[in-house]
Amino acid sequence: MRVGVNHQCDICGKYFYRAAYLKRHLDIHMSLKNKCEICGKEFAGKSTLTGHVNTHIGLKNMGCNICGKTFHHGSNLKKHMVVHTGKQNHKCDICAMEFHWKSDMMRHMDIHTGQRNHKCDICGKAFNRKSNQKYHMDRHTGQKNHKCDICGKAFHHKGHLNNHTNIHTGQRYHKCDVCGKAFHCKSHLEKHMDIHTGQRNYCCDICGKAFHQGSDLKNHMDIHTGQRNYCCDICGKAFHQGSDLKNHMDIHTSQRNYCCDICGKAFHQVSGLKNHMVMHTGQQNHKCDICALEFHQRSAMRRHMDIHTGQRNHKCDICGKAFHHKSYLKYHMDIHTGRRNHKCDICGKAFHHKGHLNNHTNIHTGQRYHKCDVCGKAFHCKSHLEKHMDIHTGQRNYCCDICGKAFHQGSDLKNHMDIHTGQRNYCCDICGKAFHQGSDLKNHMDIHTSQRNYCCDICGKAFHQVSGLKNHMVMHTGQQNHKCDICALEFHQRSAMRRHMDIHTGQRNHKCDICGKAFHHKSYLKYHMDIHTGRRNHKCDICGKAFHHKSYLKYHMDTHTGQKSHKCDICGKAFHHGSNLKNHMDIHTGQRNHKCDICEKAFHHKSHLENHMDIHTGQRNHCCDICGKSFHQGISRKNHMVKHTGKQNHKCDICAMEFHRRSNMRRHMDIHTGQRNHNCDICGKAYHHKGNLNNHMNIHTGQRYHKCDVCGKAFHCKSHLEKHMDIHTGQ
């Protein structure tokens, strides 16, 4: 029995404070009732019936002089006036909590006594008041008698409908005295006040986490027990709370009722819209106490704090990897299962996460919501903007302990560490090649499938990745934004400039284990290794010739097609490759930057100097398998082999004379045309070929580079030495 409740009903056992209340209650049992003619409900008192009838006819005669709110019954107005006065005359003797009305205090006392006399016959749940049991029964029956006239939404209780109506009207009667924030219903204000007081009376016995309300603690306990009573009928997904299931159903119906007035983006829930609006205002109210980083939302800051504490409570059962947040573990599990539920309607590409699909869709639509305030550049997703901002700030907080290299993001540092450890966890099932990152493996797979989804609108060339297309487009614009500080040479890409810088520094970190030759770049070493292994993976479909590198095959294909895209503006000569045109231009400018340290002879190209050095060293590594003759260069041996085969593919159109090599035929054509473009500056004698002029100049200078190893006699040109050697051999 409650304290101070001395009057008990002999029929139902209910207690009352006063005898008058008990007497009125007994009239109910004695059937002294006043019946409503509209709904049939019966009441003990006539005044109570009158107030009830006003509910049906919508009559509210009792109005508040302060806020204008009207009521059906005078007793309701009396209770309402206490809210304006702020007077709380009823105090709990146990916890000292104060209330406006005695009825509220009586209901509160049931929390301390634990008394719940009204039990549900279906699920066994007990309640303090009969009205609470009645509302609970509506959940089992699904009965919602109170419907909103504006949006049609129905509710179990009229009070819930009233709170919901305030959302449509925008009325917020319940205002916080501390910060002035107003709310639609009183319960929201009460929850809000706990933020100011910091009061959390409901504590979890398992993990110690505290909550403002008992309902929050109850929902939290479902996480420990794993109980999920609310299941989706469409996809079978289960939830701890009914509200979570309700929000989930909006995904299936695609209903997004909450729309942003600035960018038009729509959301399933009002909370999603609220969080989104912070992005437009740029307001970041949540600051990290350790690194001072600011965030739009408190949840984002909490996740950030796990980086400082190193706490990773969510572990993968398959590979053992741990994560700061449960959602990250969930996305990670999709990698193991291969599940990709979010598919692009345009290109069919599937993603593990919906956010990734949204960012991908922006590529098709061309929408770039995230703009840099410094340079104005816009991006499809926020993460790309954040990475871009590090370029302006120059901030690199993640440093490698081994080589000291710094990175903008922790993920970049992690990928870099795989280079030091040599760890390659992503392996190709077709060719067995392994990669440091999953993205590299994915790009590699496009080579096997020959899939090239990114096409150039100007020349039609297709690429595996969008980055490849982007780099290619710079070639068409001719824009060279990356300049060398030493020689002022300009480049289309930063990576090309970095490789160029190694020429100035002389740094060659990539060394061949077989011959010891060093290279500026790892890719150059890779191509070089193919020479030792003899591997030629790139084969011509026309003649069957194979090459070490794909670019060599490409140049070779121009031989079949006859395409020469690079033309000299001075003499009109065309070339297959841009580098050949560049070397050719040195002939017109007379520039010879590569000089021999022994004889001081200068050359247009570095490879020509290297070939020349073999003359001084006497090194002849390329030997004929038939006659044993050796050569300084492989191309010389190749030209020599034509003599053994007797094949003469180049024929003169005038005299039908045939030649082994095209260059010999060209020199022969000068005889028919009489063209002699190479004149001696001393005696004026003219020659068909520049090599003949060089040999002639040795006569004037007296230089004899070609010496006989047998008798020591020297000659002006190589051909004279070869004729002389026949004397010793008797050939």
Image: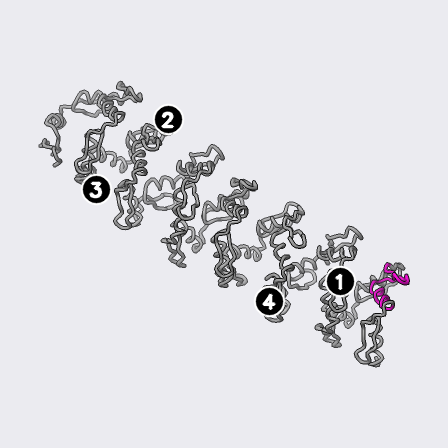
Q: Are marks 4 and 1 in contact (CB under 8 Å)?
A: no
Q: Examine the rendered structure and indicate whether residue 330 appears above or below residue 693.
A: above
Q: Is 142 in the magenta? A: no
* 245 and 602: which is toward the camera: 602
Q: In the rendered structure, which disc, 4 or 1, sits on the residue that comes first in sequence?
A: 4
Residue 334 image position (x, y, % from top left) = 43, 52
Which element type, helix, strand or loop, lies under badge 4?
strand
Q: Tell me the mark number nearer the camera, choosing from 3 and 2.
A: 2
Q: Which residue is drawn at 20% across and 22% down?
A: 49
Quarter occupied by residue 196: top left
Residue 195 image position (x, y, % from top left) = 32, 38
Quarter occupied by residue 637: bottom right
Q: Residue at x 73, y 62 (%)?
A: 594
* Residue topped by disc 3: 124
Q: In the rendered structure, which disc, 3 or 2, sits on the residue that comes first in sequence?
A: 3
Which disc number belongs to residue 169?
A: 2
Where does the N terminus fall, quadrant-wise? top left
Which element type, helix, strand or loop, lies under badge 2?
helix
Q: Do the residues labelled 4 and 3 touch (CB within 8 Å)?
A: no
690 vs 100, left or right, is right
Say which amino acid is labelled 1: Phe
Q: Tell me the mark number nearer the camera, choosing from 3 and 1.
A: 1
Which disc number belongs to residue 511?
A: 4
* Residue topped by disc 1: 603
Say which amino acid is labelled 3: Gly
Q: In the rendered structure, which disc, 1 or 2, sits on the residue that comes first in sequence?
A: 2
Alpha-carbon span between mark 2 and mark 4? 76 Å
* 688 and 454: which is toward the camera: 688
